[in-house]
Amino acid sequence: MDFITVGYLSVALLLVLMGLGLNVGLSFILAGFISSSLLLHLNAAISLLGETSYSAIARPTWVAVPLFLLMGTFCAVGGLARRAYLGAYVLARPVPGALLITTCLSSGVFGAISGSSIATTTLFGKMALPEMMKFGYDRPLSVGCIAAAGTFASMIPPSIMLVIYALFTHQSVAELFAAGVIPGLLTMGAYIAAIIIRVKKNPRLAPTHHLDERFRGTSSAIQTVFGMWPIVLIAAVVLGGLYGGILTPTEAAAAGAVASLVIGVGLRSIEGPKELWNAIGESARMTATLFLLIVGALYFSRVMAISGLPQDLTRALVTPHHSPLLVLLAIMAIIFLLGMFIVPVGIYALTLPIIMPVLLELGYDPIWFGIIMLKLTEIAAITPPVGLNVFAMKAAAKDVSLGEIYRGCSVFLLVDIMVLVALVAFPSIALWLPSFV
């Protein structure tokens, strides 16, 4: 059996294993191991797996991933999501659909320090949904807004997914972070505009409610807004240190984790060893799950490279007969379809070894494409059948059906598609800020 054929079989085997419900990380490892055994021999396959398990992640930059997870966990335990929500509420209260807009603003603010869309969705699902239900907001629109706004954490830096993309493609983390700022803010603004338009057309979706007694006075409102200072400070430490050339991505993540811990202790949100241990334990569990997936994904990527399939597809796609735009659109369509079934890290591992040589040969900027790919996985996070943010929302609100969440996400899905079209048509939206890094 020739190498290219084994490459195609390995992809088919991977999809079958994931379709059977096997853990995604284990699916990558098993598919890669079987394929490498066919390509090489059993001892070589075992040696490749062992070497990849160590060397693939034995780089200092990978340490940024668990450190950003730890920072987000400390922020969640420290009550910073609540501070973001109350501050955003004060800013959004005069606008139709104030609580929906508050969710968008606070998810964006908290996403800037959490880096995890699933964590953001879960936190605001528990915190914002009861407030919306209390004032008679439309339930599908409310849960859809929370699930969709959770994706801001993937785009707005510091983003864990951008760090992982940088490590897969050997791109600059700082440039990718800079590239995500404007698309993230653009998406947030588009969500808010869509909410205002919908609520003005149908006020029953978000009834006007009386102002919370806590915020009737100007001084108390200002105090609530300024209560978001810990988030601003942590973001300044991480991004200021990174863009100021003072800190590497790993050092910035460590500084952010320490700052979030110190602030949590100072605000007495983290009062003792129990809260600290719970936060560290949760971060460790998320890190173990994510790194199993990453190791499996990188192992599978190496097997794919040995098979020669990426190079074969590059030669087939990069021809004078194929328009670069049509090739790009075909790649985007494949990623979108995969996103309906596979977690983002899995998509990166499955596609990047194949598509990056094609895109570079066609002259596309890898920083720009990182934002395009992240936008596609954001869309996938609220798209059936396996929308990760939808399932996170379902876990936070067990009495809400998946159908209601998907229905509520539909308006935000259309907005995401429009933003994606703008990013493809005008690459400078993503590339303007990185040009200054």
Image (cartoon, rainbow, N blue to C red):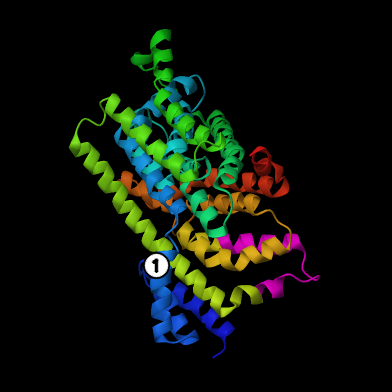
Which residue appears at 50% of the width and 75% of the height? 303
Q: Is 327 contained in the magenta span? A: yes
Which residue appears at 61% of the width and 73% of the height? 310
Which residue appears at 44% of the width and 42% of the height? 251
Position of residue 254 measured from the top left corner of the image (x, y, whole percent): 40, 41
Viewer-closest of 63 and 347: 63
Q: Determine whether 405 is above or below 126 in the image.
A: below
Q: Determine whether 201 is above or below 3 in the image.
A: above
Q: Amino acid at mark 1?
A: Ser
Q: Is 314 contained in the magenta span? A: yes
Mark 1 crowdedness (10 Å alpha carbons): few <14, some 14-19, many ≥20: some
User: Which residue is at the far right?
Assistant: 320
Viewer-closest of 5 and 237: 237
Q: Is residue 361 visible?
A: yes
Position of residue 128 measured from the top left corner of the image (x, y, whole percent): 37, 33
Q: Determine whether 311 is above or below 95 in the image.
A: below
Question: Would residue 177 appear left or right of 320 to someone viewing this image?
Answer: left
Viewer-closest of 58 and 268: 58
Q: Give residue 309's quadrant in the image.
A: bottom right
Position of residue 344 measured from the top left corner of the image (x, y, whole percent): 48, 57
Question: Would residue 148 appear left or right of 133 to someone viewing this image?
Answer: right
Which residue appears at 36% of the width and 17% of the height? 212
Q: Quadrant of the N terminus?
A: bottom right
Q: Is residue 217 visible?
A: no
The chief SS type of the magenta part is helix
Q: Give residue 30's quadrant in the image.
A: bottom left
Q: Quadrant of the C terminus?
A: top right
Which residues, given as a range, are shown in magenta?
A: 313-336
Q: Which residue is mark 1?
A: 53
| SS at mark 1 in the image | helix
Position of residue 325 measured from the top left corner of the image (x, y, whole percent): 74, 59
Viewer-closest of 309 and 407: 309
